[in-house]
Image (cartoon, coloured by chain):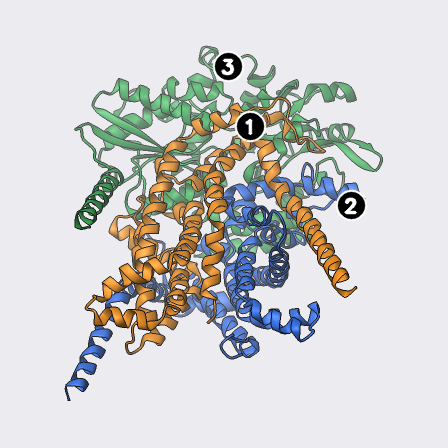
Amino acid sequence: MMRISSKQTKVFYKVLVWCFLISGTILFCLPLAWMISTSLKPLSQIWIFPPKWIPKPVLWGNYIAALKIFPFHLFFANTCIITLFSLIGLIISSSLCAYGFARLRFPGRDFLFMIVLSVLMLPFIVILIPRYILFRYLGWIDTFKPLIVPNYFGVGGYGVFSIFLLRQFFRQIPLDLSDSARIDGCSEFGIYARMIMPLSKPGLIAITIFAFLYNWNDFLEPLIYINTPEKFTVALGLTCFTDLYYTNWSYLMAGSVVAIVPVLIVFFYLQRYFIRGIVLTGLKT
Amino acid sequence: MRKKVINRWITMLCIISVFLCWVGGVSWGQKVELVYSYWGSTVEKEAVETMINEFNRLQPNIKAKGLHIPQNYAMKLQTMIAAGNAPDVMKMMQNSFRDWADRNAYLELNPFLDEDPDVSLETWARVKVENYTVDGKFYGVSGCLEPLLIFYRQDLFDEAGVSYPPAEEPWTWDEFLSAAKKLTKEEGGQITQFGVETANRWLINASYILANGGRLFNESVTESLLAEPEAIEALQKLVDLELKYRVDPQSRFLQLIGAGSLEALGTGRVAMLMEGHWVLGDLAKMEFPLDIGVIPKMKDFTYLDVSSTTVISKDTKHPKEAWELFKHANIAASGIVPLCKYGIWVPSVKNLLFTPEGRQLWLTEGMHPPHFVEAVLATVLHATRTPATLTAGMEEIIGKVLTPTFDKIWLGEISVEKGMEEAALMINEILAR
Amino acid sequence: MIKRKRITFQRHRETILGYLFIAPVCLGLIIFILGPIIASLFLSFFEWDLFTPPHWVGFKNYVKIIFQDKLFWQSLKVTSFYVGGLVPLQMMIAFLLALFLNVKIKGLSFFRTTFYMPVIVPVFASAIIWLWILNPEFGLANALITKIGLPKLMWLESPRQVIPSLILMSLWRVGQPMIIFLAGLQGVPTQLYEVAEIDGATARSKFFNITVPLMTPLILFNGILGVIWSFQIFTTVYLITDGGPANASLTYILYTYRHAFEWLHIGYASALGWILFLIILGITVLIFKYFGRRVYYLERI
């Protein structure tokens, strides 16, 4: 008797959860649905009340027009370059640093780690202005350098977070492994590159996804550092659709949909690793 | 294994060097290079690019390049000027003009005017030159004027049996108010149609303070005169349109991304829209019988022209060539006519605006409504010099003091008197710096 | 004898290597973080417009901010309301969603993606979408609530409703903390649950005695980061409300940004930045002190 009812309860709860999730999904996706709907509408149909969901006629041409008016191929290329080079820098610098904190002992190690962590608490605005002045002095304004270079020093977007995450990962690999490798004559860097890194794939994938998202959608820093429209990223490029007094809503939504697609694909396929990566660190302090 | 590593390194280096080249930008050529910065929509971008191409064609040893900054123009330009790489010729917004004039960032243009036989201070409309001259030094103009007009729907006026807004002799404020009342319809407790919308707070409020005999600043620009009775009276009349007579819909504070006033006229939610001329282009695309009238007067008939200017940077390495570009952009018909045809500009060049032959070049059927010429000419001749170029710090005065104060007044949270007193105090602080 | 020498040599080697490995990041910290922080402190004692030479004013900026600047207090108030309203709600909803998404049901990947999707949408696009949704005349929000019979709301156009509207917009992106909670839930060893079941524990007691305590480090983590991050809200207000109406959405960073980039008061803006730094530091320390003791770590159990 007890077994049957507990099974029934389990199914009941599962159905309840399912219903809740479906309604939550509908709610969360409404804005996105509107986004797609608007991207296919002629301008005259946007400001109707109550709102119409299916446009008549369906303007697939909006997508082509939107991407042509402004050099979106350039925007995409720029964003790819910035994201790619930033990711490379991030992975290298944060893993090296995490390795040092996780698997080597030296005086002041934990204190330095606390300092690195405390950067998370720093409001960006405090360093924004002097950084801008520094970059201006270096002549880096209106180039991609301010966005890419800091990643090679562990201080780009998600830099500290990655150091933290990877350190957790690295700590869990038994010290005996590296000890025996050292006795066999392997260099420290060799241990890092050929043993620890391959074992930490989930963590690396997790930080790659976080950082990829961050760099792809970053708005504030490109806004401040990039002036010429040809050098805009996709996130900035979307602002071209609005000017002082008018917004072309359909084109803007079309551009946004296209901006989301790559990230969506990346996330959908890699989400398993993503979550697994964070799980395996335990995220314990 | 080794070969693989080397290969990878080589590929890396190749990618990096391609990237560096691309980012660094390699440029050849011995032509004089000029940069012209501007803002605006895609339509303006096309027009400016055409203008620049024509300039390059006419001046074979100059290569001008357009720098289109569609967003945050004032901020971007400021940082460029402060960094020492200002564009050679740049459009400059009215509210930030004086800050940089005071910092000596512009080239004085009087010497060029003296030398050049084609151009003089008489080439452009008087108010344009006045607005951008500081202590006798003329710094530039742009090719456009932007009169404040009433855009209205003939069909809604016909329906209500109200005579159209005049195109030459302005209504008095009371006549205007009574027309607006007749055009406001209520159905089942909700107002379905409003008589007029006056959403552009800075433009309209400042214009009417001046139109009522008031002023923003005193002679020596050390104090704000906003708390004087004329200013308060003017603002009260404007606020009453919305809060007392309810002929003006709830103010839209979110004009930033164009969330609605044009659509309001387009969908017939309002019968009249009081706004600067630049919205004509977008309104003409909508399908309703549009026409234009002059704004009503208070004590006087006047308005504030908020159109921008073009200046030449003091640090430009090629002043003579920059002057040629400036001339072409702000006098040549090719630089001005396309934007007028799109309903964005009204020319400030006298012989394009005040002569019939000049007007023929740009008036377009289907864009410019029936009473366009009379209304625009009447309005433009009554412009007052803008107070926004009398002092530096206007961005702060408007952004920090006036906009929030107007918000509060229009929300009914504070009376006009109190609001203006507070505003005057804060403005005096800023002026004192 | 030889053994001791070898150990010292190993220790030295390890120390040097340790410093080498963390060198790039330390360099980065000095150049891109520490340097700017000190520079910013330094700048806060000057008045500078980036163009004319700076001039020294000592503590004048700080005095002006604290004692004479009404907008400073306004922006602090606005930001505090936003943070105080958002973070608790965000934590609860994220936790709840993570719990639901931890149940083995069909279509789990699909659901996870949909709840995370709002985080992927570029900030500008999402601002525009919400601008339309919350438009009092034409927007979806009013369309829905009037169907239920509620009166139309002004949303972003009313000074009293603008902060709750912004909180609503931020809650749309609850997928970010949700994912962290989800990972945390999956990290709870299932043996603990099995053992508890054998002992006859109910679902409720499993939840309160195993799940919640083990999730406390993550709750603290998400909470602190949530406070720090939401205190810095800028992009959305910058794009949509520009601090209005009547400064009701003038967040701290927006105000600082204006002083720095729109009115060119570099020194004043630097002082504002430092004050924010100290405030956030203070809040973080308080949170650690108060909640730190209630956090359980798996190792201790």
Dot 3 or dot 1, earlier in sequence: 1
Q: Residue at x 54, y 27 (%)?
A: B277
Of badges 3 and 1, nearer the viewer stands 1
Dot 3 falls on a residue whose secondary structure is loop
Instruction: From the image, state the color of chain B.
Output: green
Labels 3 and 1 touching (C-beta < 8 A): no
* Residue A166 versus residue A179 in the image, above or below: above
- Residue type at numbered disc 2: Pro
Of badges 2 and 1, nearer the viewer stands 2
Q: Position of residue B57 (x, y in %)?
A: 27, 18
Furthest toward the left, the residue is C2
Q: Position of residue C76 (x, y in %)?
A: 55, 63
Residue under numbered circle 2: C151
Alpha-carbon span between mark 3 and mark 2: 47 Å
Q: Nearer the viewer, residue B394 or B91?
A: B91
Instruction: From the image, state the color of chain A.
Output: orange
Q: Which chain hosts label 3?
A: B
Instruction: From the image, state the color of chain C.
Output: blue
The answer to whether residue B227 is visible is no
Residue under numbered circle 3: B363
Residue under numbered circle 1: B279
Q: Nearer the viewer, residue C193 or B146?
A: C193
Q: Are marks 3 and 1 on the same chain?
A: yes
Q: Residue at x 42, y 17 (%)?
A: B351
Q: Are marks 3 and 2 on the same chain?
A: no
Alpha-carbon span between mark 2 and mark 1: 33 Å
- Residue type at numbered disc 1: Val
Question: Quarter of the image holding residue C201?
Answer: bottom right
